[in-house]
Image: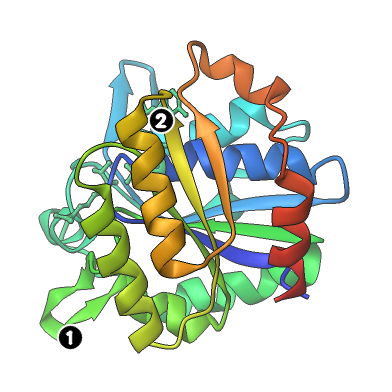
Amino acid sequence: MARYFWVAGTDTDVGKTVVTTYFMHYFQAKGEVMPYKPVQTGIIDEGSNSYYRDTQFYQSFSEMELAKELINSFSFKEPASPHYAARLEGSVIDEEIILQHLKLLKSKYDYVICEGAGGLYVPLDEKRNYHFHHLIKESQLPLVLVTRTTLGTINHTLLSIEALKAKEIPVAGIVFNAFEGTDLEADNIATILQITGLPSLVIPKLQNLSDLKQLRLENAEEFFERLLSI
Ligand SMILES: Nc1ncnc2c1ncn2[C@@H]1O[C@H](COP(=O)(O)OP(=O)(O)OP(=O)(O)O)[C@@H](O)[C@H]1O
Ligand SMILES: C[C@H](N)[C@H](N)CCCCCC(=O)O
Ligand SMILES: [Mg+2]
């Protein structure tokens, strides 16, 4: 029963944090949930108040207090690939720390939702040729793939699915994010589903992100049932 899974993406900026937060909010009605961003980059420095966008976003939508030391393991100031942002700070990312932390979270929470950084091939340590997909594989958790609905998504999505299949990482479904309702986007979605046969959710482009709390997706129950059955 996969109450622990990854929210991965075809790219940076595709909506992994929005989707992670929507999932967190959905499952908080069913039990204790911990969103987990193992590696985040790009500090937002507002003088006395500096923070990281992703974990701050989780906090702002969570029905319960999320302990800072639980929702993240590595944070680097430069808004860049983790391997580079870490190097700029003379640091390295140790996947063992992440895997150990994941074990702790799984023992404490009913649901753990892990968000990737960028896309699957983002390096955590280029010297060891260690990428995010290696970490996902080692975690032995399934994933949901977040993708755009706009021009270019067919190739990006199929490439990511192909890579996941080759690495035998279970894909529970695809979340098409920020759908604006155009015919092109609708055909992109239909084409990807026709080729992959995967379950899917479609999240509309929200005028206000605060609408995320009220978001009700018609096939959400079915999608989550399948996700939890993996
Ligand atoms: N469905 C949506 N409706 C409106 N805005 C959205 C939606 N999804 C994402 N956004 C906006 O698009 C931007 C990128 O989204 P998000 O931060 O979730 O991407 P990400 O994949 O988590 O990026 P990263 O790789 O940096 O973690 C953010 O400004 C976010 O608020
Ligand atoms: C800074 C950004 N928001 C993400 N946290 C990191 C994105 C890394 C992308 C690396 C790449 O694919 O070139
Ligand atoms: Mg994010």
Q: Is mark 1 on a helix, strand or loop?
A: helix
User: At numbered mark 2, what does the secondary structure look like: helix, strand or loop?
Assistant: strand
Q: Which of 198 and 14 is in front in this view?
A: 198
Image quadrant where residue 2 sits? bottom right
Name above or below for residue 54 compared with residue 159: above
In primary-sequence order, the first of circles 2 and 1 is 2
Q: Which residue is drawn at 68% across and 71% down?
A: 104
Instruction: Give the camera-side residue of 153 and 19.
Output: 153
Quadrant containing the C terminus in the rendered view: bottom right
Report the amino acid beneath label 1.
Answer: Arg
Task: Give the residue pinned by disc 1.
Answer: 128
Q: Quadrant of residue 131?
A: bottom left
* Residue sitting farthest toward the top: 207
Whether residues under marks 2 and 1 lie with C-beta atoms below 8 angstroms apart, the answer is no
In this rendering, the count of numbered labels is 2
The residue that appears at 65% across and 27% down in the rendered structure is 61
Amino acid carrying label 2: it is Tyr
Residue under numbered circle 2: 51
**Quadrant location of the N terminus in the rendered image:** bottom right
Q: Is residue 56 visible?
A: yes
Residue 12 percent coordinates (x, y): 27, 46
